[in-house]
Amino acid sequence: MKLTKTYGDLKKELDLIEHALTDAIQANHGVLRESSTKLLQAGGKRIRPVFVLLSGQFGDFNIDRIKTAAVSLELIHMASLVHDDVIDDAKLRRGKPTIKHLYGNRVAMYTGDFILARALENITTMPEPIAHRVLSKTMVQLSTGEIEQIRDKYNWEQNLRHYLRRIKRKTALLIATSCKLGAIASGAPAWISEKLFRYGYYIGMSYQIIDDILDFTSSEAELGKPAGNDLLQGNVTLPVLYAMENEAFYKLLKDTFSEPQQVTTNDIQPLLSELKDTDAIRLSYQLSDQYLHKALKELDDLPDLKAKRTLQSIAKYIGKRRS
């Protein structure tokens, strides 16, 4: 089963959001319009709008208000992807050339900035001051997470606490905010919006951990980029942290990256094989499952709506994801 099937009944609302995203990225300048459109057409799971839509059903659901929050959050996510690809010098995303690869660093950075500006312009139509405070705090944390990732590249001495803090800022908080803003936009009670925020945080942590696992266990065709690409870029993810506890892996890692800028995809193949021979993948899934269990617990006291059951289904799907 695909993730999209768990929320198949939201197709009508997601189509409206997709049209709104297309409208939001229209620019007077041809290059900005073209690059932004290519990014949008590259697709994506639109999981953040899905969380906004589902959380909005715990209050007075109004698609126009919900759509505003959903579009802004997806635009912020899109902008962060463009900036990520510049930082990582990535040529592919979802199997398609990145904006950075097609247009160069300058256009890519301005495209990301343009999309981010559109997100901020869009969110101003939400009348709730708390929505603006929540989103601004999240964006500060997101930016901090990006800086931390740059700082920690090729740093083999970092620990689990560093990693968890980084993925919280880079991934989990934006998903948590998607859940909270959906509830706020629908006028749901504060206790519900807080529970949905925590659900989104735990889901986001699990989702990123599994993404980091799949970087080692999936094929290039499944990933849309070379397997082990995070490691090649010097990003120390959870499987690497666990694998480094193995002396043989740690020595091979240090030897392979003695000159980081010279390392190629072929050079890291022995590392990928060595990592799979350790307990790193199993331990990483184990931590992901702990976060998923916490996410499901946050839903226990929520009203028994179809949206709640869909949120439960999404969590269970993520827990079983192996590609």
Image (spheres, rainbow, N blue to C red):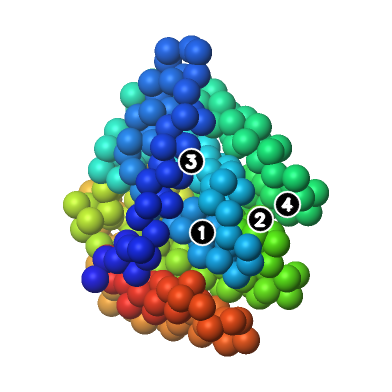
Residue 21 position (above or below residue 33) = below
Which residue bears the numbered disc 2? Answer: 185
Q: Nearer the viewer, residue 181 or 173?
A: 181
Distance in Å between CA atoms under marks 2 and 1: 10 Å
**Circle 1 or circle 3, nearest the eye:** 1
Residue at 26%, 48% in the rendered image: 224
Q: Can residue 139 be seen in this view?
A: yes
Kind of residue indicated by mark 2: Ala
**Circle 1 or circle 4, nearest the eye:** 1
Specify few, some or many for label 1: CA neighbours under 10 Å numbering under 14, 14-19, or 20 or more.
Answer: many
Specify few, some or many for label 4: CA neighbours under 10 Å numbering under 14, 14-19, or 20 or more.
Answer: many
> Could you tell which of marks 1 and 4 lies nearer the N-terminus?
1
Mark number displayed over residue 53 = 1
Residue 80 horizontal/vertical position (percent)? 53, 41
Residue 10 horizontal/vertical position (percent)? 39, 59
Instruction: Tell me the quarter of the image containing the C terminus.
Output: bottom left
> Could you tell which of marks 1 and 3 lies nearer the N-terminus?
1
Element at label 4: helix
Residue at 50%, 13% in the rendered image: 28
* Residue 217 in which image quadrant: bottom left
Element at label 1: helix
Mark number displayed over residue 78 = 3
Distance in Å between CA atoms under marks 4 and 3: 20 Å
> Could you tell which of marks 4 and 3 lies nearer the N-terminus?
3
Labelled pair 2, 4 in contact (Cβ < 8 Å)? yes
Which residue bears the numbered disc 4? Answer: 131
Kind of residue indicated by mark 1: Leu
